[in-house]
Amino acid sequence: MSTIHHPSGETLGAFAAGSLDEGRRVVVASHVELCASCQRLVSALEQLGGNHLEQLRGTPMAADALEKTLQRLDASPDGAGQLRHAASDLPVQLKALAPYALEPWRWIGPGVYRRTAAVPTDGGARVFLLKAAPGTRLPHHTHTGTELTVILQGAFAHAGGRFGVGDFDEADGTVEHEPVVEEGQDCICLVAMQGELRLLGLMGRLLQPFVRM
């Protein structure tokens, strides 16, 4: 698999540093699973971070720190941390997505379906799968927050280029696009979205009250 589009340096650096919210982390991690070059880059960033930590002066731990940590582990629900939902019907099996339950596909518009992933938001991005039929033209839109997308099947194109399996699309309120799904097969994407879609143009303003992404 050869990917062309990758997360920005800022996004990938935040991922390596562990500072992304859980929703965005899941989507970036999914791209990294599919992209050998980003795997190498993340490994290098993590090594740099580790070297920096080694140079910092240590802080003594509380006397009961180990005991409290063990108590928290014992209190974790049965099966926590295990791969509970493999989602075997997806075209790509992702370790990053596997721990989270997936709802059934739900129709949201002509040829377009959404499937929510039970990733805690905690004020961050909500995560869902989006499936669109070949030839589907999504409305011209921008965003009130950020949208991170990794493609799992098929492809789409907009002014930013063509995005195929493994590619990463990153958008915010500075970006306007109108994705068109490539012919041949359904396009399935994993999305982390903060804020809302904002449809543009006269038709967009008419449709806006009915759009819930």
Image (spheres, helix red, strand yellow):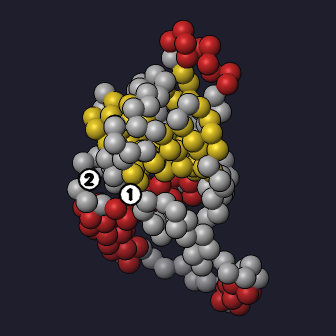
Where disc 1 sits, the SS reads: helix
- Report x, y in % for residue 205: 59, 14
Question: Hey, what amino acid is under mark 1?
Answer: His
In the image as oriented, which residue stretches furthest toward the front? 184
Instruction: Give the left or right position of residue 49, taking residue 194 as reference.
Output: left
Circle 1 residues within 10 Å: few <14, some 14–19, many ≥20: many
- Report x, y in % for residue 174: 43, 27
- Report x, y in % for residue 86: 55, 70
The residue lying at 36 percent from left, 69 percent from top is 46
Observer-nearest of 59 and 182: 182
Instruction: Give the left or right position of residue 109, taking residue 7 as reference.
Output: right
Asked where in the image residue 161 lies, by quadrant, the reply is top left
Circle 2 residues within 10 Å: few <14, some 14–19, many ≥20: some
- Report x, y in % for residue 173: 48, 28
The residue lying at 34 percent from left, 42 percent from top is 184
Task: From this view, report whether residue 196 is shown above or below residue 3.
Answer: above
From the image, tell me which residue sits under label 1: 31
The residue lying at 37 percent from left, 74 percent from top is 50
Picture quarter with the N terminus: bottom left
